Image: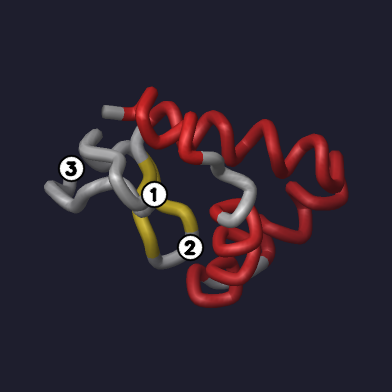
Amino acid sequence: MSSEPCFIQSCAQSYYAPAGTRALCKKHFLDFITWRRKKGGAAMFKKYSAMTMEERDPTVDEWGKTITMKDYSESK
């Protein structure tokens, strides 16, 4: 397990799972999975799983822009 902090700015939770070349805490990882399912369904999961870690970064960045300040305060 890595000691890398969550990719989401102001989140102090520890690493749970990778998201591209970055790391997410458990709460944000589950939010990311939910967002991917809503955004593209099964096709998005197949496409994402075929990508390299570096190719996944733009998808993670797109999701990261949807996070609100309310989400930040809940993650602390």
The colour scheme used here is: secondary structure
How much space separates mark 2 and mark 1, taking CA atoms?
A: 13 Å
Q: For mark 2, does the 10 Å Cα neighbourhood hold few (<14), some (14 to 19), or many (20 or more) residues?
A: some
> Which is nearer the N-term, disc 3 or disc 1?
3
Left or right, 26 with reference to 44: left
Amino acid at the residue labelled 3: Met
**The N terminus - image quarter:** top left
Q: Quadrant of residue 35?
A: top right
**N-term-proximal mark, 3 vs 2:** 3
Q: Position of residue 48 (x, y in %)?
A: 68, 58
Mark 3 or mark 1, which is nearer to you? 1
Which residue was labeled with disc 2? 20
Numbered disc 2: secondary structure: loop
According to the image, label 3 marks what residue?
A: 1
> Which amino acid, mark 2?
Gly
**Relative image position of residue 45 (x, y in whole percent):** 74, 47
- Residue at 49 percent of width and 69 percent of height: 53
- The picture places residue 46, in percent across and down from the top left corner, at 77, 52
Q: State how far apart marks 3 and 1 are (Cα).
A: 18 Å
